[in-house]
């Protein structure tokens, strides 16, 4: 594992219980997280997200497979080695877990005491509190802070030792919309500045925009966002067909179009989301829960397409991949021996969608 891959999991499985009560939570999971990368881990409740996070954090051991963190094989590692790894990880949990009897500065200081040597303790504490916007709150107690400020204090405690890995479990679950957004964008900023690898577990689809990648965990397996969206799209169509079989495909495209417009400025506001909910309820005759599902899936579809485009853009062989991509589309169009104007128009639309090279050099009679 290279130095730029702080977290590497290969064929990892995990079980709870024994004998007849044994339940498999993770099945042959493979994942790598690079330095400076922010990965969001999504999935339904009980899918194993927190279990996977604790494996990455050296808080438990997998029964099979390989878990390497910062170059250390964690499986069967000695406790001293595990402690050394934990000291290089910043943990951010949904409950801030601050000690009410201590000031904010003292709470942050507790994390520093885990280190063997601290030379400039006061300066480090003040610097990290300034960094999270709590520079004037070091002498306050947790009950004097708002929920968002307490979460920021928890982040300060996690980051004071400048960890190489940040693991966050539902950091926005107890926060209002704006506080949640502020907290996640703060984690994003700090990851960029310090080059830490970040894994963030969340159910909150409002914060997917901060991720370099989104991984979806379901039935013990990790899937890419595009795989998860593909499966959920089938569920969406089934749902829409129950309401209006003749218009299901139109409604699916319609909801995706709404998401594209909302994402056009790279920021989806709550007012835009509420308008989408309203339109979907009215146009598709959906109840509130159904409209919410369709809206969030459409957002995920947009995100998946953006990820695919970004992957092409970042690849060192971009031109070659772009040409192969376009040629493959034309090969499909020409499978019946003829490329129609409608097929050319669709290919050009796809090329534009993915930010690929101009397809004007292709003619109707030759792919």
Image (cartoon, rainbow, N blue to C red):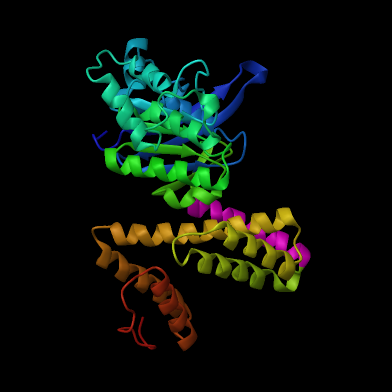
Q: Name the chief secondary structure element in magenta.
A: helix
Seen at 70% across and 60% down, the residue is: 238
Report the quarter where the N terminus lies. Answer: top left
Q: Position of residue 131 (x, y in %)?
A: 34, 37
> Image quarter for residue 239?
bottom right
In this view, the residue in front, 50 or 181, is 181
Query: Where 183 falls versus 244 (above or below)?
Result: above
Seen at 62% across and 36% down, the residue is: 45
In this view, the residue in front, 181 or 58, is 181
Q: Do we see residue 305 in this rendering? A: yes
User: As drawn, is 120 to the left or to the right of 20?
Assistant: left
Whether 147 is among the magenta residues is no
> Image quarter for residue 161?
top left
In this view, the residue in front, 250 or 203, is 203
Query: Where 287 falls versus 10 (above or below)?
Result: below
Query: Where 323 falls versus 362 (above or below)?
Result: above
The span picked out in magenta is 225-243
Q: Position of residue 30 (x, y in %)?
A: 42, 37
């Amino acid at each position: 594992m290279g130095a730029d891959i702080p977290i590497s999991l290969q064929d990892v499985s995990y079980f709870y219980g024994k004998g007849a009560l044994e339940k498999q939570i993770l099945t042959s999971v493979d994942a790598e997280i690079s330095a400076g990368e922010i990965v969001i881990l999504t999935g339904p409740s009980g899918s194993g997200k927190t279990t996977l996070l604790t494996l990455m954090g050296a808080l438990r051991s997998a029964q099979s497979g390989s878990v390497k963190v910062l170059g250390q094989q964690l499986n069967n590692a000695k406790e001293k080695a595990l402690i050394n790894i934990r000291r290089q990880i910043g943990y951010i949990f949904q409950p801030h877990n601050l000690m009410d009897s201590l000031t904010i500065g003292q709470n942050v200081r507790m994390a520093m005491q885990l280190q063997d040597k601290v030379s400039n303790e006061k300066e480090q504490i003040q610097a990290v509190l300034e960094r999270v916007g709590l520079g004037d709150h070091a002498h306050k107690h947790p009950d004097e802070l708002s929920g968002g400020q307490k979460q920021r204090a928890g982040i300060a405690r996690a980051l004071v030792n400048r960890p190489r890995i940040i693991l966050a479990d539902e950091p926005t679950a107890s926060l209002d919309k704006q506080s949640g957004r502020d907290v996640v964008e703060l984690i994003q900023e700090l990851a960029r500045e310090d080059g830490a690898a970040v894994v963030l577990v969340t159910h909150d689809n409002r914060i997917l925009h901060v991720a370099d990648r989104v991984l979806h965990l379901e039935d013990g397996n990790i899937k890419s966002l595009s795989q998860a969206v593909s499966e959920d799209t089938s569920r969406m169509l089934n749902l829409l067909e129950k309401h209006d079989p003749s218009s299901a495909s139109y409604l699916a495209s319609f909801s995706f179009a709404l998401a594209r417009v909302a994402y056009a400025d790279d920021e989806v506001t709550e007012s835009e989301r509420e308008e989408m909910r309203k339109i979907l309820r009215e146009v598709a005759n959906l109840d509130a829960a159904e409209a919410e599902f369709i809206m969030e899936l459409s957002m995920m579809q947009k995100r998946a397409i953006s990820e695919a485009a970004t992957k092409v853009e970042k690849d060192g062989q971009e031109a070659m991949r772009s040409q192969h991509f376009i040629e493959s589309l034309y090969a499909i169009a020409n499978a019946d021996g003829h490329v129609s104007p409608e097929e050319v128009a669709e290919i050009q639309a796809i090329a534009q969608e993915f930010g690929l090279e101009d397809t004007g050099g292709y003619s109707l009679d030759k792919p």
